[in-house]
Image (cartoon, helix red, strand yellow):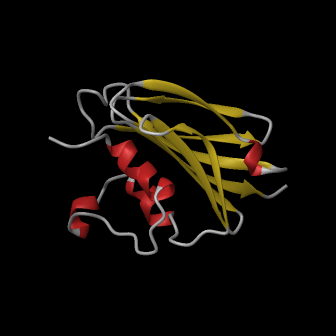
Amino acid sequence: MVMGTRAQQLAMYAVYEAPFQMVSDTPKAYEDQPAFEFIRHCPTTWDEIKVLNGQPGEYITIARRNGSTWFLGSMTNWSTREIEIPLGFLGPGRYRAEIYSDADDAAQYPKNVSIRKEMVGATMSLKAKLAAGGGYAVRFEPVSP
């Protein structure tokens, strides 16, 4: 039994501000876990913070910037939901988005995470589909022209 999905656990690294990030198991438990890449890259200090949407006790989406890289976390309570996330906070230019979302079967198997990469810009938006107790985490890296 787990409280929330793996994607929600990843999103917490961007949603919650913590000057000391840690994982809750031995390092060996994270070997060969592709979703660990989000944690590996997530910093503990931020240059800018944007609250993109939310409702207390229901859901939240926060974007945080460190240098030129943005990290986004979106979490829901025990209600499934779909959230549209506008990317205007990115500013000009193109970004490579590495997206960690609840897999289609996350309601039954909460450790399953879908990982995909796509090119995005500030005029676009992402559609996040969150399972009950689910989440959505994204790392945005600028792409040189």
Looking at the rendering, in which quadrant would you find the C terminus?
bottom right
Observer-nearest of 8 and 29:
8
Relative to 111, residue 139 above or below: below
Q: At x 42% / y 53%, what residue is drawn?
A: 12
Relative to 72, residue 113 above or below: above
Q: At x 38% / y 57%, what residue is drawn?
A: 36
Quarter where residue 22 is shown = bottom left
Observer-nearest of 56 and 40:
56
| 97 relative to 77 in the view: left or right | right
The spot of residue 81 in percent (x, y) is: 46, 24
| 84 relative to 2 in the view: left or right | right
Looking at the rendering, in which quadrant would you find the N terminus?
top left
Residue at the extreme front: 56
The spot of residue 130 in percent (x, y) is: 43, 30
Relative to 63, residue 67 above or below: below
Q: How many marks?
A: 0
Observer-nearest of 2 and 38:
2
The spot of residue 15 in percent (x, y) is: 49, 53
Relative to 142, residue 81 above or below: above
Q: At x 28% / y 27%, what residue is drawn?
A: 107
Q: At x 30% / y 56%, what residue is drawn?
A: 32
The spot of residue 8 in percent (x, y) is: 38, 44
